Every structure is written in C-alpha cells, then in structure tokens.
Amino acid sequence: MARYDRAITVFSPDGHLFQVEYALEAVRKGNAAVGVRGTDTIVLGVEKKSTVKLQDSRSVRKIVSLDNHIALACAGLKADARVLINRARIECQSHRLTVEDPVTVEYITRYIAGLQQKYTQSGGVRPFGLSTLIVGFDPYTGVPSLYQTDPSGTFSAWKANATGRNSNSMREFLEKNYKETSGQETIKLAIRALLEVVESGGKNIEVAVMTREKGLKQLDEAEIDAMVAEIEAKKAAAEAAKKGPPKET
Amino acid sequence: MKLDTSGLESTSPFFGSGDELCPELSAAPSFSLPLSTDFDEFQKDTKATLKHAKGTTTLAFIFKEGVMVAADSRASMGGYISSQSVKKIIEINPYMLGTMAGGAADCQFWHRNLGIKCRLHELANKRRISVTGASKLLANILYSYRGMGLSVGTMIAGWDETGPGLYYVDSEGGRLKGTRFSVGSGSPYAYGVLDSGYKFDMSIEEAAELARRAIYHATFRDAASGGVASVYYVGPNGWKKLSGDDVGELHYHYYPVTPSTVEQEMAEVAGA
C-alpha cells in the first residue's frame, strides 16, 4: 500500500488541531443521540429524520450491536460509522479468540477511541467524523456502563450523555433530571431527553434497550408511541396541577 | 529470526502491527537458512542434538484446595547427565506457574514473554488475566512458529477469578484444558502413581505427598529424570514452593534399608 508522508491534521500556531475541530462540527450537525445508564437497564435513543417515503426504514438501523452484550449509537458521518463499527466488531471477536473471553465495555471503547486517535496522527487521512455512545454490561461483574468517544480519540464514562444536534439542551435536561433509575423509568428518562429537541412521535425516534439477561432489544414504533403518550400525559397533569390550586382561595 | 514483540502491541497479533491503518495479515516470522549442502539432514541432526532436554518428568493436577505442580531437575544429553539442578518450574507471575519440558531456552524465553504479556494485560485492563487467556496467548504464539523447530511441552497452572486453572500447551500449537497432566519421558511412570492415588478431596499435604511420590517413582525408572523433586502449590493467594527433595534421599525415605540377619557368612579359606 502506498504510504503518504504528508499529514493533513497538523497543529495551528495557537495549538489547535483544526481538522479535529471541524470533525466535531460535523458531529454537531448529525442526528441527536442520547444514552442513559440505569441500575439494570441501559437505553440508547437516536433521532430519526422523517422517513423518506420509498426508503425501507429497516435498512437504516442507527443503533447497532457490536457483540451480544455491547451496543453502539453514533452521531455524525454515517459512512465513517460503518467502517468504525466493522473494525470494532472484528476486534470483539478477535478478543474472544485470543483470550477466550468477551470484551469489556471499557476495552472496546478504548479500542475505538484509539482508532479515532490514530487517524488524527497519520499521513494522508482525515479524522472520523463521528462521536459514539457505547453501552454494555461487564461480562464478569454485570455492571452497566455508558461511554462516549469523539473524533479526537478521547473517551470517558458517563451516567447519561447526549451527542449530535442540540446535544447541549439534552445534556442540560439530563443534568437537571437525572437520578438513579431502573427498567421503564430509565427508558422514559431517555425518551424525555430526546423529546426536548425532537418532534414527538414514534416515527421520529429510535430507541433500544439493553438488559443483562435479554441483551439488546429495539423498541418498535407502537411501544415508543405508548411511552411518549404516557410522558405527555404526565407532563399535562403536572401543568394542570400548577394551574389548579391558586383557584381555591 | 524475528522475535515476537507483540507484547508491546494490541492483543490481536493476527490483525496487523501497530502502525498499519488497514489490518492485513502480518508476514509470517522467518529466518535465513544456514549454508549447508543437505539442509534436511542438517535439520535432522539439529533435532537429534536438541533432544537432550526432553528427558524430564513434570506433572500438575487440580484438587479441592487448588493446583499442585511438581517436576524433577535433571538435564541429560543422551547418556550424559549435564545438570542435576535445572529449575523446571517457571514463575510467570505471583499467581501463575509454567513447567518446562522440551527445549530449556525455548521454555524459559516464552514463559518470560508470557509474563510480560500478562502484566501488560493487567495494566491495560485493570484486572488480572485469566489462566484461560494466558494459556491461549502462549498457544497462539507457539502456533505461529509451528514447523520452525521450537520444542515446548508446558503446563500453565494458576488461580484466577473462576478458581484453579490448568492447561497443557505445546509447540505443535495444541492446547488442552484438564485436571491431571504429566509431561516428559518419565510421564508414563508418574501417571501410574498419580492416577492410582488421585482423589479430588485431598488436603494440601496429601496432594503434595502424592506429587512428590509420583516424581520420585518416575526418576527411579526413567534414566533421563532425576535430581531434585520440587513441589509447588497454587492457591487463592498465589503460588508457594512446598518442598525440594533429593530423589536419592527420597528413595531411602520410601524404602528404608532394614538390617537383616545374615544367613551365610563368607569365611576365610585357609590354605596357600
């Protein structure tokens, strides 16, 4: 393979790597994605652009599994995502082959982040234009984890996080409303965060739930609609309660 | 010969070295041939000379309290005993042991290399590597050098999160999980004693005595085994050397000489 000797990602005089920052811009223009970690459930939610009529929506799954116990959602360039996901899937199997054990969430996150970093320090290539949210359960201890990586190759663990379009508003919402949840409550928290920035309705949201026993389960439109309805009803009740009491004086 | 430095890279040796962006299969390790008219004959001679260290008896077994590992300490070249004090139980790390059978240098080097890999795994993943993982790393390396003359017949014994672990790994690339193994020219004799005396429910002392006796009997009958019978125990807190007894002394310990009455005495013949 021909080797390129000129790097594209180089430092600016004031210490910035502009290519990496531009990649982060690309992420900011991508679909909103949110991840919430509960005590026994982890939820990933992604904004779905309104379906183009003739497109088969099943072929554009935005939340994918890397292994039986690990799932990934991302925001940014989808073609870059495909490449990164394939490499991660190979690494998951390769790890199983060389040490006869499944990967931990931290290991595969470190691998993906390492890959993203490599592309910011090599000749002839540009950084990957996506941030990922990686969730899973530790195969030994069963502890749930949520990690995020970005185009610069940094990664860290989160209780809840959002990336992509309007991620700041979603993160603010999560900071205000996060508490330790489990089961349905975790799913509702993730959907509520997404609803802050996305048009409500099962058509515009894709949600996947991961549990230790059952692995990754994609929620279908009907289930999402039902939850959204519950959330809206609760919201309406809360607003009504606020307006109610003052009348009784 | 290109030595294995993949301990410094990721855990997927088959998928390209560190600085390649696209994973391709690395070129297989290779070395240049020595100058000789008949290389096959040269190879045969080399293999015959190397046979000196296969004369050995090593054994390991899992029991209720953990893993017991034992070995002799003789190195022989044909009929010549080159050493009576070879360390055949190699300490990979504080909770894992490897036994040596086959080429001494091969065993020593690759066990140290395995120790490096295990430590790097610990540092990267913040948890100890399992015995399964460690034995698999070694087996994969040995497989990649298959056919190039490595001679290694080793057992990896250790204690990890899942309890005691014992694997047999050899230079053909084979890897077996098991509860009782013996490797070397003295192994048939050791198996005889080990298999007939083995019980899962043994105390540490009983198991150590069984291991010691099995090594002793192998050294008694096999010319290529002898020296000192070392016995190690691997438990939840790591390994511990239990004993190292000279097999000559063990012989008189098991079969003491009883003074008996003489039936006929030799008398001096009187005369010229």
Image (cartoon, grey):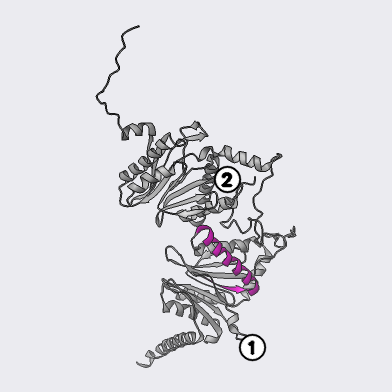
Does the magenta portion include A93?
A: yes
* Quarter of the picture holding the C terminus of chain B: top left
Note whether B263 is above or below B75 in the view shown: above
The picture quadrant where one finds residue B256 is top left
Q: Nearer the viewer, mark 1 or mark 2?
A: 2
Distance of label 1 from label 2 (alpha carbons): 62 Å
Residue in the image at 50% along x and 50% along y: B169
Residue at numbered disc 1: A54
Res B108 seen here = yes
Amino acid type at circle 1 is Leu
Range drawn in magenta? A71-99
Quadrant position of residue A213: bottom left
Q: Amino acid at mark 2?
A: Leu
Horizontal and vertical percent position of residue A90: 58, 65
Q: What is the number of the mark on residue B150?
A: 2
Where is residue B190 shown, x and y percent of the image? 40, 43
Secondary structure under tag 1 reads loop
The 10 Å Cα crowd at callout 1, few under 14, some 14 to 19, many 20 or more, is few
Is residue A98 a member of the stretch shown in magenta? yes
Of residues A158 and B76, the one nearer the viewer is B76
